Image: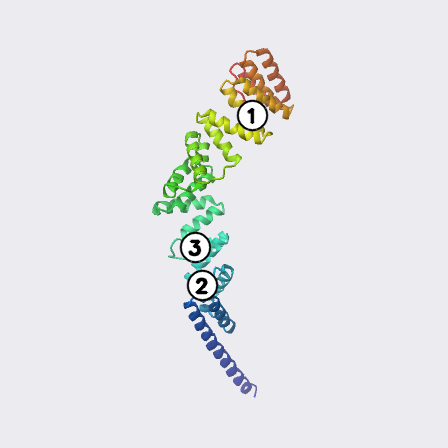
Amino acid sequence: MKYLLFIPLLTLTFQVFAQNTDSAQYFYQKGLEEKTTERWKAASAYFDQAIALNPKFTAAYLEKGNVNLLMRNTDMALRSFVKVNELEPANLEVIKNLVTLFYNYHQYQKAIDFAAKCTGCQNMERTMALCYFRLEDYTSAERLLLKLVPHNPTDAELAYTLGKTYMEMELNAKAIPYYLKALQLDTAKATWLFELGMLYYATDNNKNAVVYFLKAKNNGFPVTNDFNENLGYAYIYSGEFDKGEKILQDILSKKRGNKEIMRDLAQIYYERKFYDKSLEFCQKLMELDVKDAKALYQAGLCFQKKGDRERGTKMCDRAIEMDPSLKGMKTKIETPEGL
């Protein structure tokens, strides 16, 4: 008797499922029609109705994801594509969309994981390389970029990223050629121009540093005190002392307590035999800190160079008492080099 009751119940269940499936297909088709006429919001609503009637309707999830991409509703699109991936893990169209979305959401490890599954898909290695770079895995980024850059000679971003990778790895000399290549392809990138200037500055090629700092400025790079400080030093060390001095003096007028610039100017003036100017900055440093042994020692060297050897020697000896680490400079008094 129990079996006889079960058979009608099972039949009813199949009938309900068949009806739901038919209804789901109906709403799915309505959604496709709305999509064709670019009524994407209405299309998404129909796809929702289809999914409500058939929670495993993969095509409806996929189309819902697509129309939400078109509406730039990326959160909804991502959820839809994740569901499709659960139902059809080998769907390459969905995997490509997930790679792009996770990359745009800065979920770089997830983007890498899905890119690795996209066998035969274009640009997956490119995306993986960029993801590794943003994850600061520079070794993995370098490995892929060295493979990709030669085969993509017009891709400025790839060349730049390889250069930036070497910059982050503190391999500045290796970075420069890739920055130059990237800037041949895209000449107006202000940040790239500035970073190349910094690379030249770090490798003591100050003339080129000045060139690229100015190009960065002309292309809209923010002219902050830090920018001007780098430019000022590059001018000085490239031989254009007056230009650099003016810039650093201007910064110091705005940042009167900047000991680093004061100390640098004291040393620069000393090296150029402007001993009185060097002493001015030594005095300013000691006014800020009476225990500044380095400034006192630098002042002692200046007095020695000005001919007051006794006074200068006493000042250097006093500085060494204050900071014994300066004792190594004692042997250089005959040919002082400063600090």
Q: Residue at x 48, y 79 (%)?
A: 19
Give the image quarter of residue 178. top left
Q: CA distance from mark 3 to mark 1?
A: 53 Å
User: Depth-wise, is mark 3 or mark 2 nearer the camera?
Assistant: 2
Residue at the limit of the structure toward the right, as seen here = 290
Q: Nearer the viewer, residue 14 or 55?
A: 55
Q: Which residue is mark 2?
A: 66
Q: Nearer the viewer, residue 2 or 189?
A: 189
Where does residue 29 sit, x and y in percent of width and height?
Answer: 43, 73
Q: Quadrant of the C terminus?
A: top right
User: Depth-wise, is mark 3 or mark 1 nearer the camera?
Assistant: 1
- Give neighbour class at mark 3: few <14, some 14-19, many 20+ (Cα, 10 Å): some
The reply to whether the C-beta atoms of the residues labelled 3 and 2 are less than 8 Å apart is no
Q: Residue at x 50, y 29 (%)?
A: 247
Q: Is residue 249 above or below residue 321?
A: below
Q: Secondary structure at mark 3?
A: helix
Q: Is residue 90 above or below residue 230?
A: below
Q: Secondary structure at mark 1?
A: helix
Q: Which residue is mark 3?
A: 116
Q: Is residue 16 above or below residue 75?
A: below
